[in-house]
Amino acid sequence: MEFVYEANDIGTEIETILVVSRDRDRLLWSYPIEGRADMSGVFVLPKSPAPDEDRPLIRPKPHKKDAKDAKGE
């Protein structure tokens, strides 16, 4: 996924900012980001929510041998 922009005909202003997804030279999908940038040309993107601190995001599965040892086999 990428953020790209399209300039006007003479390249002095940003006309559109797009989110695009490509597979090498092939465009898979794209959509424009609505709204206009301020005079600096900066868009403030939303921050992602913080992960839940109580639980890990990934829980590894125990090896079969470790699982048998835990059961007392």
Image: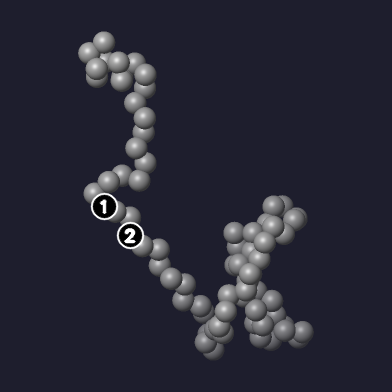
Question: Which picture quadrant has residue 25?
Answer: bottom right
Q: Residues within 10 Å of mark 2 (few under 14, many from 20)?
A: few
Label 1 SS: loop
Residue at 65% x, 79% y is: 16
> Is 54 placed above or below 39 here?
above
Secondary structure at numbered mark 2: loop
Residue flagged by tag 1: what amino acid is it? Glu
- Percent position of residue 56, x then y: 31, 44
In this rendering, position of residue 5 left or right of residue 53: right
Q: Amino acid at mark 2?
A: Ala
Dividing the picture into quarters, in which one does residue 30 lie?
Answer: bottom right
Task: Please identify the quadrant where the N terminus is shown.
Answer: bottom right
Q: How many marks?
A: 2
Q: Which residue is mark 2?
A: 50
Task: Please tell me how crowded label 1 is: few (under 14), some (14-19), or many (20+) other residues with Cα within 10 Å.
Answer: few
Left or right: 44, with 14 as reference point: left
